[in-house]
Image: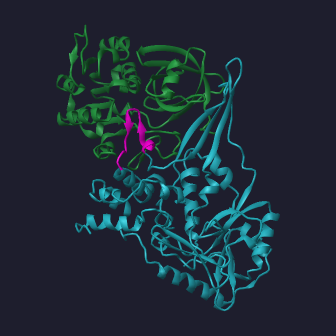
Amino acid sequence: MNAALPVPHRVAGRWVDTADTVTLELAPTGASLPVFRPGQFAMLTAYGIGDVPISVSGWHGPRPLHTIRAVGAVTQALYDARRGDVIGVRGPFGTAWDVGSAAGRDVIVVAGGIGLAPLRPVVERLLADRASFGRIAVLVGARQPADLLYPRDRDRWAARAQVEVTVDRAGNGWTGRTGLVTTLIPGLRADLGAAAAFVCGPEPMMRFTVQALVARGVSPGRVQVSLERNMRCGLGWCGHCQLGPLLLCRDGPVVRYPVAEPLMSVREL
Amino acid sequence: MSRAGDSPRLIDPAALGVLFSALRERGYTIVGPTVRDGAVVLAELESARQLPSGWSADTEAGHYRLRRRADEAVFAHCAGPLSLKNFVHPPRARLWSSERAENGAVSTTGPEEPGKRFAFVGVHPCDIAALGVLDRVLAGGKHPDPVYTARRDGSFVVTAECTEPAATCFCSSMGTGPAATGGFDLALTELLDGGHRFVARSGSPAGAEVLAALPSRPAGTADVLAATSALEQAAAAMTRHMPNEPLPALIAGSRESPHWDDVASRCLTCGNCTMVCPTCFCTTTEDLTDLTGEHAERWRHWDSCFSVDFSYLHGGSVRTSAASRYRQWISHKIGTWPEQFGSSGCVGCGRCIAWCPAGIDITREAAALSAATAGDEP
């Protein structure tokens, strides 16, 4: 099996999340891929344009969902794909969130922007096995209200978890909180000294978030982050996704904070 | 020094022609050194007469010049601008092509088979080590690269042990030469004093079978000693070396070193070092389509961590400064490669030193980092 060959999938469902973001449900037209685990990613091919790494953001039955923000040629083409269109999928690649290691603990999930997409399966897994975990808190930050993802999911989660939302810049009609996601941390209802944390978002957001969590007693070894670098293959062949000693397609994207911290703190590494 | 294999044989220069015939009879396409465009390059060869008999090259930082020799030494040249990477990990390769039918269904075809089996002749031990590095990177992981394995698997390697290292060579300090300790089918050690001849030994059953097909005689003790002595002298003649300390720790401790700005003041970020390096494997991909849009292809080509685009994420590149890009290259090569792939990424061939237009020398930069770490910035 040549993992460089995209496996054709039909767009079986398409939901517009925000002005520049869609979630696609993908169904194989023939051969299917192994099941993705939360945190793992696919390389999605827009035929003739290119491929990009996109995390799994959920499932409809066995079919993976991928949430894509249009920021370049390939992601724009994927955004433009409609139900019935065929795109190529490779994967699953990379490490998964270790949700099991949080069993018995309070759990803190912190997402910045599109970083909520790879964390949505974590929240769903926590809630699906609600009794195995202590208190669950989901902190969500976005630049502006229009960028907030998954409003219905967040409403559903709020019945069984502490869900807090903040935006950097409020717009007309926004009655919620404003400020960086780190401003939500003092309001956490959790036993921070024993809690596990899952964090994904822009690198500075992750750095400041984890610093704030650690300052309040969270053990760095119980923090997992998801990192991002340029990727051309997902297979360990292309060298682009290096971050220090890590090949993020193989050793990441999900790593424990003590691994990430010395690498995230060096400029241009 | 390990001298593995059956008892060594002695062959004459004329036997190289027989070697070429024997390899061709066995279905190999022969790739070896030859003089072209003012350098010893690697190319598909028809005849042993194309080998660079009587040629050497003088190298220094930013310098490579062919030199005519007084003798007819065949393998006395040093590493040229090409390496076996050019053949087993081609600069451009089509990863797949796809067709979209009228109903939208897409069918995909994988890479073309090379249609040839390579015999690499005259490979210096540093380049055997480089093949071993590429084997670990491209074939040794969870996803073997089919483009690489189709060219590498079943290849035949004739090494020419290095008796005349160039000024830019430092294989002895990387433990990759000048003697060959494995990874070959047939090893030749060229002797010039007392008659032009080669000590030959096999390193595999396939090599033993080919050696048996060559006109040869048993190598005498004096010949074997002469070969051993030539290799010891070659090792002793190398003036360049890497700092004698664990390089991954040196690199990891140097991430914030002010020395990177010093290198950046000289580095043109041209990427020559990554192109000539026999282990630099990084690639990018490019998707193409025809005018109808129904036929698409993905091509892979060599890329360089010295390009700004290499680290592009939406919004900008991670490594924009020259300092960060040089740091990435040397850090990967000698610092993080062992953790990623279980061996150093540097084999001591010296190509990056000779082909750097600014004469930047990886051994000197490593030494400068070492000195700075020791608290005594040069």
Q: In this view, does A7 lie to the left or right of A262?
A: right
Q: Position of residue A90 (x, y in %)?
A: 56, 32
In which quadrant of the rendered view does residue A33 lie? top right
In the foreground, A209 or A44: A44
Query: Could you say where residue A200 lies in the image, as x and y percent from the top left?
Result: 34, 30
Q: Which quarter of the figure has residue A31?
A: top right
Q: Is residue B206 left or right of residue A45?
A: right
What is the residue that sits farthest to the top in this orientation? A173
What is the display colour for chain B? cyan
Q: Find out whether residue B312 is within the magenta segment.
A: yes
Q: Where is residue A140 in the image (x, y as percent from the top left)?
A: 29, 22
Magenta stretch in the rendered image: B308-321
Does residue A131 sit above or below B30 in this rendering? above
Q: Determine whether B91 is above or below B227 in the image.
A: above
Q: Quadrant of residue B220?
A: bottom right
Identify which residue is drawn at 73% across, 85% down.
B218
Can residue A66 be seen from the camera position used here? Answer: yes
Question: Visible in this render: residue A251?
Answer: no
According to the rendering, which colour does chain A have?
green
In the rendered image, the residue lying farthest to the front is B37
Q: Is residue B274 left or right of residue A205?
A: right
